[in-house]
Image (cartoon, grey):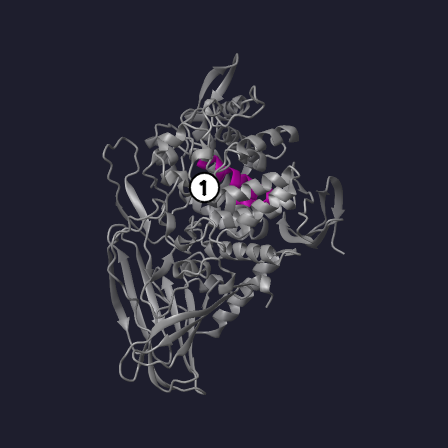
Amino acid sequence: MSPAYQIALEDLANREPDTVATIFSQGNGTFGVRATDPLLAVDGTVVNGFFETSPIIYGEAAHGYAKEHQTIVPLPSLRHLTIIDQAGHPAATHALKDVRLDMQTGALTMTTEIVFPDDDRPLELTTTSLIGQADQDLTAYLLGYTLTTTAYEGVITFTKGPLVFQEKESDIERDPRVVVRPLQLKHAIIDSSATAVVQRIQTTESQLTRFIKTSNVAGLTQTVKVAPAQPAHFEAYVQVAQQDSFALDLDAAVAQRTKAFWHQFWASAAIDITGDDKMAQGLHFNVFQLAQSANRTGEYSIAAKGVSGPGYEGHFFWDTEMYMLPFFTYTHPKIARKLLEFRYRQLPLARKRARDMGVAQGGLFPWRSINGAEASAFFPAGTAQYHIDADIAYAVAQYFEVTQDKDFMEKFGLPILWETAQFWRYFGAWSERDGRRVFMFHDVTGPDEYTALVDNNTYTNRMAKANIEDFLSAYAQLAASSSLDIEEADLQALKDIAAGIYLPEPGDNGVTAQDDTFLSKPIWPFATTPADHYPLLLHYHPLTIYRYQVSKQPDELMLDMLFPDDKAVSQKKIDYAYYERLATHDSSLSRSAYAVLAANLGDTEKAYHYFMDSALLDLTDLQGNTKDGLHMANLGGSWMSAAYGFAGLKVVEGQLSISNRLPAQWQTLALNLLFRGRQLHIVLTHDNTVVTLLAGEPLTLAVDGQKQEISRK
């Protein structure tokens, strides 16, 4: 097994139990299991879309405020096992010895030293686990336990019983981004035998139900003898399903299909670095975990922490479409399509939300949600981020551009583009600026949540323009087969708005303004801000932060990544230099975008250092909160740093373009992509760029500024 495709305990900067549990978590987008100590009855299972609701209590409520919290329900760990000696004493963990995750097969191995009370003869418990990845195995979790010893001898009993639910207290500690509510659940054993037990778990308010079956054909309780030359083995099979029906039995074929899934995954999504093993390992870990959190059914999306932990209450944000989806669009478009179909299914609630916000037509997607209803209780940095509509539309347009999937576009993509384009039409307003009539958007919040409720956030305006233009372009191609009934007057109104949306020219200082007032504010007093006062949002009132020029993450600069040909390079350099000095990188979304931007400007040394932080963010616990779950947007962002940044990947007028910006620290960067039915293998060295067509029809593309035609040899 290649070290670059393995993560071990020694690779972690922080080896506290909760961080270890996150890093070595396993998932398949339907549910995830954190790598908790198998002898501890603790929470450790995250089921995508399994949430509870509770009323949001405002001191002063107003019309249109979000009404209910939606909180993912952490369930007890599926890994839990009881081991007792012949005197009935339970074993306890003495030390964590080793943990290893094989990213080529998905298998996790954890070794712990355990002891029985009043007995100094240690034993080693090795727990192996695998979560099903094939479509028919998305409910499956396989466990194997092996007990070995060099000194102990005696009879022990393994018991794999039903999930153990603990009383929970409200967690109001450290970080408002991490909320654990004392949720009430109904749980009951509905079927039980010597070889299997089935539990029903139901939320009290949202009335969601899941069923968990634990089984072992040899029995859930087994008594065996263990001795120095006589290890003891125990296996278990757990399934998590929405219905009380379990088609699968304990079967080695699940493991075989899972291994085949990962083999195919890496064939399509291969991305390798030579000359920098640590960065290669970090990048492999990031895309592996991204795949583990991607729902493949279209029922749910990818939450901010995926299925690796309960952070952000299990909510979906713009992160999915802008940071995670590009990886799937270019490597696993079937998964990308399912994630976008999820947004299509949210359209009825999006239309309702738009009406709640006083917008007569179109739909407004929620800023944070699980089921499609807005769950953000802080509207200045929540609902006011109307750019969520354009972010989703951008992802739809990019998916269509890369895949040419007309079936998706006709059924799902075009309705999304239409509803979001209509929203901008009825949300904005015509006005006068610099002697000309322009279309503006007032009181919005852009990606930089340290600047809120402003007029003409440049990111929002440019993205809205792209949203409308992408709809008009797609509709022109597909109108004949589309079920949408659109009047010519509506199309003309959208054309006029797209042409008239206000976009600022650089000001007197040469900088493109983030919004109408940002550049007129004083700059944040960085020199006198204590190092332990970051992130700022945990130490300063929002109104204090809003008064200054300070950036949580890229905002106006994001446009230079998403629309790399909009500006001259000289202007991009001015804007980058200005906004970079205002950046706190308090958001985990920040560094990967700065890596892309620096690479695009030719500063590969700076890009490399930003990429290093992004690629290793969770492995080094850079943000200090990996214990709450992986930073999923950053995982996707690190792939974008490599693909968009160092490989210069972009599509210009339907043609794929690659530009070699290999950093000095690497010998090669190689990656596989899918583009319009072709599978490509791209290798960048310091002397050359080679693109090989692995499958599909011949293709014309641009490589380092030169047109090339490639075909299979």
Tell me the magenta residue range. 388-408
Measured from the top left, where is residue 613 in percent x and y? 54, 48
Measured from the top left, where is residue 88 in percent x and y? 26, 81
Q: Residue at x 39, y 61 (%)?
A: 17
Please name the residue that numbered disc 1 is placed on.
586
Q: Is residue 200 left or right of residue 395?
A: left
Amino acid found under the numbered disc labelled 1: Asp
Q: Is residue 168 left or right of residue 72?
A: left
Q: Is residue 290 left or right of residue 233?
A: right
Q: Is residue 147 above or below residue 570?
A: below
Q: Of residues 560 and 258, which is closer to you in this image?
A: 560
Measured from the top left, where is residue 686 in percent x and y? 73, 49
Q: Of residues 383 and 38, which is closer to you in this image?
A: 38
Q: Is residue 586 above or below residue 579?
A: below
Q: Of residues 159 and 595, which is closer to you in this image?
A: 595
Residue 404 among magenta residues: yes
Q: Of residues 24 and 566, which is closer to you in this image?
A: 24
Q: Residue at x 57, y 49 (%)?
A: 612
Q: Is residue 635 above or below residue 240?
A: above
Using the rendered view, name the quadrant where residue 548 is placed.
Answer: top left
Q: Is residue 552 above or below residue 254?
A: above
Q: Secondary structure at mark 1?
A: loop
Question: Principal SS element in the magenta part?
Answer: helix
Residue 366 is at least partly visible in this image: no
Residue 259 among magenta residues: no
Q: Residues within 10 Å of mark 1 (few under 14, many from 20)?
A: some
Quadrant of the rendering where the C terminus is positioned: bottom right
Measured from the top left, where is residue 345 in percent x and y? 41, 44
Residue 186 is at least partly visible in this image: yes
